[in-house]
Image (cartoon, grey):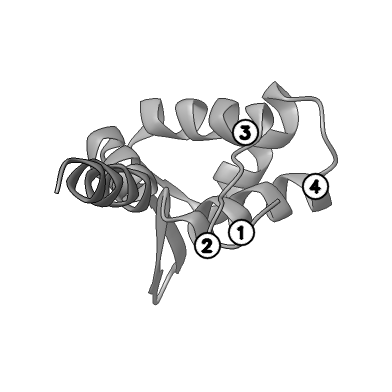
Amino acid sequence: MGAGRVRVEKREIAAYLLLLDKGEINLGEAIDLVSMELCTTKRTARRIIKRLRRLGFLSLELEDKGARVRCKPPREVLERLVAGYIEKRRSRCKNGRG
């Protein structure tokens, strides 16, 4: 895999879609939901959520009563993921026609 490439696995997309339906959810509940629906251990579910956060699919907000997970809008996430690709394609197009 080259530098700058981001690979999003099917299980991460599935977890994002599950959490997207819930809107804002407690971190513990999010881990339980992903664990139960995707038949993973809680440790794996925690890692999936952590990766989704790192990739920009989720935001994690710390509150007095615990952490809350909030899904970012799909369009915002997808635009950020493909922004680099679109920019490279545009520069190739300009260079080839110049």
Q: Which residue is mark 1?
A: 50
Please identify, in this view, whether the residue under mark 4 or under mark 3 is nearer the observer: 4
Q: Which residue is mark 2?
A: 54
Please identify, in this view, whether the residue under mark 3 or under mark 1 is nearer the observer: 1
> How packed is label 1: few (under 14 Cα within 10 Å), some, or many (20 or more)?
some
Give whichever of discs 4 and 2 has the lower sequence position: 4
Q: CA distance from mark 1 to mark 2?
A: 6 Å
Tell me, yes or no, if residue 72 can be seen here.
no
For label 2, the SS is: helix
Q: Position of residue 96 (x, y in %)?
A: 25, 43
Give whichever of discs 4 and 3 has the lower sequence position: 3
Residue 33's disc number: 3
Residue 82, picture quadrant: top left
Give whichever of discs 3 and 1 has the lower sequence position: 3
- The amino acid pointed to by label 4 is Thr
- The amino acid pointed to by label 2 is Arg
Q: Which residue is mark 4?
A: 44
Tell me, yes or no, if residue 35 can be seen here.
yes
Residue 31, picture quadrant: top right
